[in-house]
Image: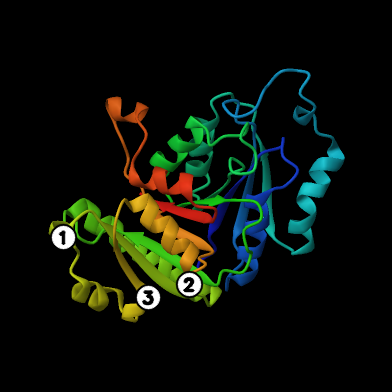
Amino acid sequence: MSKQDTLFVIVDPTQKEHAALERAVITSRLRDVSPKLKVFVAVDSAAVSLDAENPDLYRTSEWFENLKKPMIDDGLDFTLVICWSTQWHEAVLQAAKRTEADLILMPDYSAKETRNRFSDAKWQVLRHATCPVLICRPGADSQRKVVLAAVKMQDTSPQYTELCDKIIARGKWMAERYNADFQVVNAYADSLSYPDRGNMVRKLGIDSDKIHVRQGSPDEVVADVAEEVDADIIVVGTLKRRGVMLAMRGNTSEQVMGRVRQDIMTLN
């Protein structure tokens, strides 16, 4: 029997739509064993004004009852956790670790609302989470038809090889779960960094026409292919940073996230 996973679902109480919670409920219906949901309600002060006059900071008991209703209706095993720490990303990481989360579902409203940007705190969650993070965007299709995995198979260093293996395995698992089409994209800079396509076909075990190898910057290539194949979700890898690198942005995964409209699964 498959084990019962724990999904750590982040809810922004200042929003009317709860993209991560909606995705968690849908995902639960597709699993052989219904997961446990840890629904974490907290305000990211880096993205939302905490001024007293902000009406979105006030929520009644009726609001919480409406939040719980879809989980109750589906008979899901869930726990509601309310957090008022100002250290949002630290609270998310610690709470997810304590609950031994198998997946963090994090909403992203930055494409819909420029004021609600993808904050530094959210980048920190992506970089330091010990489990995959699914970035959920309002309006994304609930039924995945195409899962697109973004890899860099020309880099044969142990670090990238391990990360690519994780991306491929997760993408295939998700495609199987949703009965979706699995496709792969690999960008390269020039002829010297062109990946071994034959090796890719053998390793991926999918038809050659589902493997998209293109020259260009990774963020542009991934975004273009995602639109062409009408991907519903993109699986990418992100590497942890230390020291002064923590203050810097611009790695490939972050650039991809800024260009695409789809949900994104990040692994590190």
Q: How many residues crowd around disc 3 within 10 Å: few (fewer than 14), some, or many (20 or more)?
A: some
| Amino acid type of the residue tagged 3 in the rendering | Lys
Other residues around mark 1 within 10 Å, as few (<14) / some (14–19) / many (≥20): few
Tag 2 secondary structure? helix
Q: Using residue 227 as the reference point, say whether residue 81 is left or right of it.
A: right
Q: CA distance from mark 1 to mark 3?
A: 21 Å
Image vertical order of residue 112 relative to residue 213, above or below: above
Is residue 75 something one can see in this rendering?
yes
Q: Position of residue 153 (x, y in %)?
A: 23, 61
Q: Which mark is residue 191?
A: 1
Q: Residue furthest top?
A: 52
Determine whether label 2 and label 3 are within 8 Å by CB.
Answer: no
Q: Is 160 or 77 nearer to us in this picture?
A: 160
**Distance in Å between CA atoms under marks 2 and 3:** 13 Å
Nearer the viewer's eye, disc 1 or disc 3?
1
Residue depth check, mark 1 versus mark 2: number of the one nearer the observer: 1
C-alpha distance separating marks 1 and 2: 31 Å
Label 2 CA crowd tier, 10 Å (few <14, some 14–19, many 20+) = many
Which residue has dot 3 on it?
Answer: 210
Instruction: Check disc 2 and give the amino acid type.
Output: Ala
- Give percent across and percent down for residue 209: 35, 78
Tell me which amino acid carries mark 1: Ser
The residue sitting at 76% across, 57% down in the picture is 70
Q: Residue at x 18, y 54 (%)?
A: 158
Element under disc 1: helix
Label 3 SS? helix
Can residue 102 be seen from the camera position used here?
Answer: no
Residue 31 in the image: x percent, y percent?
58, 70
According to the picture, the residue beneath numbered tag 2 turns out to be 175
Question: So how many labels did they put on this image?
Answer: 3
